[in-house]
Every structure is written in structure tokens, then in C-alpha cells.
Image (tube, rainbow, N blue to C red):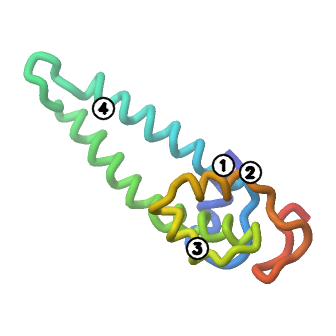
Amino acid sequence: MDGFVTAFRRYTDFAGRSRRREYWGFVIVNVVIFGVVSALALTVGRDADAGTYTTLGWVLVIALSFYGLVLLVPGIAIQFRRYQDIGWPGAVSIVGWFLPLLTFIVACIPGNEGPNKYGPDPKA
């Protein structure tokens, strides 16, 4: 949960570095939120007889869509900082949008020890 809060505090900060803990905290909390709200929309928010969404279902779908838009900037920012933590330029993370395995690998690699050209070690 700490990574999630830290990521939102650094909402538009593309400079610096982010630890694996911050990155994975952000990702896991968002996966859980999306999973829970999606499950609610598909179960409680659907009319089984008509096969359509109820009003509650539409509210949940719209809320989830809005939440996804809210996450766009901090998601890109934390991904930039994660790449910079291992010493790569943040712009390389654009390649990770098309090759998600690359982003997964980068998310698992420990960051450079000590300062690098993108800032001080976030563990220090």
C-alpha cells in the first residue's frame, strides 16, 4: 500500500527513481481494485435475465473507466522512474508498452546501488 501512496504523491514526477517495492505496490493495489470492481460489475451489476447492465453496473463501469484514466499519468510516471532506477532512460519504457515482458523483467531487476545519472538511490 505504501508504494501506491508514494506513486500518487509523485503523480507527475518523471524524474528520479522508483524502487521495485513502490512499483509493485502500485501495480498490485490497482490490479486488486480493478478486479474487485470488475467482478462487482459482472455479478451485481448485471441483469441475468436481460443480459444487460443495471444502473449500478453502468455506474461501476463508468467509475472503473474514469479510474483507469486517472491512473494513466501516474502509471506512466512510475514506469519511467522504474526504468531509470536500473540505469535506463525512462523513454525506453515506451518499448515496454508494446513488449510487456520487458516491463515485467525491468520491474523485477534490482535498481542500481548508489546514485546513478537519474538520481540518488531510493533505498538510501
- Which residue was labeled with disc 3? 92
Q: Tag 2: residue type?
A: Arg
Which residue is located at x 47 percent, y 59 percent?
71
Tell which tag, 1 or 4, sits nearer the viewer: 1
Image quarter of the N terminus: top right
- Which residue was labeled with disc 2? 21
In primary-sequence order, the first of circles 3 and 1 is: 1
Report how far apart the C-alphas of labels 2 and 3 lie in the structure. 21 Å
Image quarter of the C terminus: bottom right
Contact between marks 2 and 1 (CB within 8 A): the answer is yes
The image quarter in which residue 78 lies? bottom right
In this view, which residue lies farthest toward the bottom?
Answer: 117
- Which residue was labeled with disc 1? 24
Report how far apart the C-alphas of labels 2 and 1 lie in the structure. 5 Å
Of residue 40 and residue 77, the one placed in the foreground of this image is: 77
Relative placement, left or right, of 35 versus 80 is left
Instruction: Characterize the local packing of mark 1: few (<14), some (14-19) or many (20 or more) Cα atoms within 10 angstroms.
Output: some
Contact between marks 4 and 3 (CB within 8 A): the answer is no
Q: Position of residue 85 (x, y in %)?
A: 75, 68
Q: Tag 3: residue type?
A: Val
Can you say whether 88 is above or below 78 in the image?
below
**Disc assigned to residue 41:** 4
Q: Position of residue 112 (x, y in %)?
A: 84, 67
Q: Tag 1: residue type?
A: Trp
